Amino acid sequence: MAAGGPAAAGAPEHMPVCGPPQYRTPFGRAGGGPSKLPPMELNGTGAIVSGGASGLGEGTARELAAAGCRVVVADLNEERGKAVADAIGGLFVGTDVSDEESVQAAVDAAASAGPPLRVVVNCAGIGFAARTVARDGTPHDLAAYRKVIDINLIGTFNLMRIGAAAIARTEPADGDGQRGVVINTASVAGLEGQTGQVAYSASKGGIIGMTVPAARDLAAIGVRVNTICPGIIDTPIYGTGPGSDEWKARLAAPVVFPKRMGTAAEFAQLVRALIENDYMNAEVVRFDGGIRFQPK
Ligand code: NAD
């Protein structure tokens, strides 16, 4: 017998079998199983977005608020973070993702903001460029390497673990026992880092590597985990002004299609889709217009 049910007549034993159409209706499964529709409902739930003061996090905070979430913007940047939170009817909590107490306080605020906390999105991060050994023979600065790992990788884990523990204290949201979703932001540099990206790529590769085991761990509390690997998305991380425009045009040149940088709104649309689709779990998704990074 195939795992999960009887094999269809004539189908090989090992082949997963999609049920005949009557087993899946627009309103859920026929036969009394738990309904899969509507999907993970965002309206009237709580969300926390690290890095929500800028770029991908800001776009995500705005998208989730538009979907009806009460959003906690957790960021180091108080001025921008408050402005975003005010604009979306959310709450800003000054947060350093690499600090345990700071993240605990932000999650406590999100968990006590009213609606049940269901969504954790990790967008806080920093860029850094240096070769393992510089052209003049100097080895990579170890403190700089540690800092990138501390913010990008450990910061992501820190919010994921504390946020998921808070989600675990909520009632299940559906018949599957689902309580919430974690979305982490890695990078295509975590898969194919360029020259000078050794620290950044290690931090993002760690996020990619956590995805499957974290999803397995958190299945016990009904929490899904997905990771997005953006390519070249137009945000303040590349700086602003004419100098940065030239650099961004060069970075985006190898994008396959559409021939441009991505936008924070498009990223946020993907975050929302991954949250709302109940069957997306333990996945690492490239979001890059087809770009494949060359060595330089
Ligand atoms: P951004 O600079 O616009 O935003 C990053 C935000 O993170 C800022 O608001 C900053 O204040 C915050 N932050 C930094 N350190 C923090 C800390 N210790 N604690 C809390 N907040 C902190 O950058 P972005 O482009 O929106 O990047 C968001 C994430 O996406 C980053 O992890 C980045 O590595 C990743 N990413 C971006 C791109 C891109 O092309 N923009 C591509 C791949 C991956």
Image: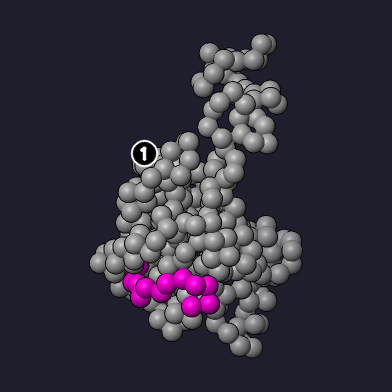
| Depicted 89 relative to depicted 48: above or below | below
Number of other residues with Cα within 10 Å of mark 1, as a class: few under 14, some 14 to 19, many 20 or more: few
94 within the magenta span: yes
* Residue occupying the far bottom of the picture: 242
| Depicted 192 relative to depicted 252: above or below | above
Residue located 72% across and 61% down the image: 256
Whether residue 239 is visible: yes
**x%, y% of residue 62?**
55, 69
* Residue occupying the far left of the picture: 101
**Displayed quadrant of residue 117:** bottom left
Question: Tag 1: residue type?
Answer: Ala
Residue located 47% across and 75% down the image: 85
Direction from residue 204 to residue 229 in the image, left or right: right
**x%, y% of residue 203?**
41, 61
Q: Which residues, given as a range, are shown in magenta? A: 86-98
Residue located 56% across and 35% down the image: 35
Direction from residue 157 to residue 250 in the image, left or right: right
**x%, y% of residue 257?**
74, 61
* Residue occupying the far top of the picture: 9
Quadrant of the snapshot with the C terminus:
bottom right
**x%, y% of residue 70?**
47, 64
265 within the magenta span: no
Q: Where does label 1 land, which residue?
A: 220
Residue placed most toward the observer, 204 or 277: 277
Residue placed most toward the observer, 34 or 154: 34
Number of dots carrying numbers: 1
Asked which secondary structure carries label 1, the reply is: helix
